[in-house]
Amino acid sequence: MTIIYQLITVGIILLVAWNLFREKRLAEQMAAALVLIPLILRALMIR
Amino acid sequence: MTPQRKYGTWWTALFLLLLVGGVLLIVSHDFLAMRVDLPIYPGLGVTSTAMLSDYFAPLKGTAADTMAYILQGDEPGGTAFVLGGTHPNEPASSLAAIVLIESARVTRGRLVVIPRANRSAFTCSEPQEGYPQTYTIETANGSREFRYGSRGTNPVDQWPDPVIYINAAGQSLAGSEVRNLNRSYPGSPDGNLTEQLAYAIVELIRQEDVDMAIDLHEASPEYPVINAIVAHEDALNIAAEAAMFLEFEGMQIGVERSPDNLRGLSHREWGDATDTLALLVEAPNPAQGRLRGRTSVELIVEGIDPFYVRAAQRGLLYVPFFEAGHPIDERVGRHLQTIAMLLEVYNEYTDKGVVVVDVPTLSSVLEHGVGAFLLQPNTTNATN
């Protein structure tokens, strides 16, 4: 079950990162970068 | 309508991604540091150690496996068990157990001590509570750090929480209680990690033929069960007599009978599932209360909080609370004196006594500080 959870999280990370590079508004880019932090910590099961 | 300015480029995205990487490095280092057990220095009284997985093998290699310290006396007798660190946000519980490991000796019978019952819960702190990751106790030879953890098993080790948790004893509880060791007894060999941990502790009590088992806790000052011994009905007489003698010695303490209909707690399930005399002891910890002010190392160690003083003046608390607060010295001292008294009373009624010496009293811990009864950081025989 944990591996499925991690795969879903990795999928969301990729989508957010894709959005980070496609987004033209700096504020939206910063929001995407902020969202990435807890997602990556979860995917790596650090927190 | 003015057009929205767009300053975002691939380069800003790349810069932000690097920034994310930097933040991740710093916070990961902090979070992962909590998974390293801080050292315990076994004293001369410790004759051997065992892992909880020795009593229930599937626990081996998991975050829940934890060390038990055994203090064996020369004279044969009974076996007593002290469990600290069920809830790592109740620090006097673990610290009192560590003082026993580092200071006490057994002349008759055997004492088994686990200082980090829910080891996984020591590896994280509660979200949104602002708890420090460690607190510091001053010893004669410098400062020693101890972990301040969470009430429940680390969600990294046990996930997800259900909406409603029904424990092995059939009690329905809030979902987050699924990670609470003291709601998971008697545990289950094929349950979740916390239930397996609970099962292993019950197995230790069975396999070591423990005569008296004491679970150490702390409670917030507004919680009704505080400064109290909670006793299974089989241990009620001993608890009542011990409380009476403790009152004679000037330590205010009450006795509560373990409720029949609140299942999953140590004082109920240890007593029902095994032949042991099951007891739980509570001390007052303002750092875990809802009425507290700033959460800090000082609050954990010194136990001073002006908001609790005001709450006490309004009659909202179940313990007296003055400007001097409830320092960790007092809370650890209370636990140690209660353990000593429970054993003393138990020894009067059995041929299988457990005689533990060099247990600091409440007054000696208040006078010298708990650090005086801890071994020094430069001692070489540290265990993690």
Image: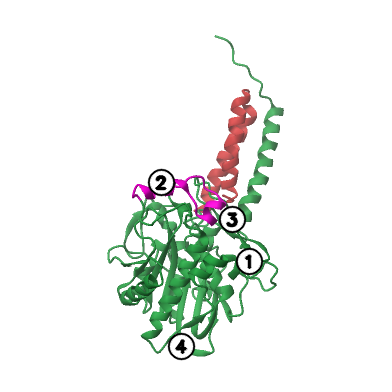
Using the numbered discs, state the Cα–Cα distance from disc 3 to disc 2 in whole angstroms. Answer: 28 Å
Q: Chain of mark 3?
A: B
Mark 3, secondary structure of its residue: strand
Residue found at the far left of this picture:
B261
The residue identified by callout 3 is B134
- Which is more N-terminal, label 1 or label 4? 1
What amino acid type should be assigned to the residue bearing mark 1?
Answer: Pro
What is the crowding at mark 2: few (fewer than 14 residues within 10 Å), some, or many (at least 20)? some
Residue under label 2: B310
In the picture, the quarter occupied by the C terminus of chain B is bottom right
* Residue type of the residue flagged with mark 2: Arg
Query: N-terminal of the two: label 3 or label 2?
Result: 3
Mark 4 → mark 1, Cα distance in angstroms = 30 Å
Which of discs 1 and 2 lies nearer the camera? The answer is: 2
Q: Tell me the kind of residue under disc 3.
A: Thr
**Would residue B187 be seen by someone viewing this image from the given angle?**
no
Instruction: Give the alpha-carbon distance from disc 4 to disc 2, as whole Å.
Output: 49 Å
Check the image and report above or below for B63 versus A6: below
Give the Cα separation between the discs numbered 3 and 1. 13 Å
Q: Chain of mark 1?
A: B
Q: What segment is highlighted magenta in the picture?
A: B291-316
Q: Is residue A33 above or below residue B173?
A: above
Position of B167 relative to B97 (above/below): above
For the residues labelled 4 and 1, say whether their Cβ atoms are less than 8 Å apart. no
Q: Colour of chain B?
A: green
Percent coordinates x, y for residue B91 in the rendering = 51, 60
Q: Is residue A44 visible?
A: yes
Tag 3 or tag 4, which sits nearer the N-term? 4
Q: CA distance from mark 4 to mark 3?
A: 38 Å
Q: Is residue B293 above or below residue B286?
A: above
| Residue B308: x %, y % from top left | 43, 49
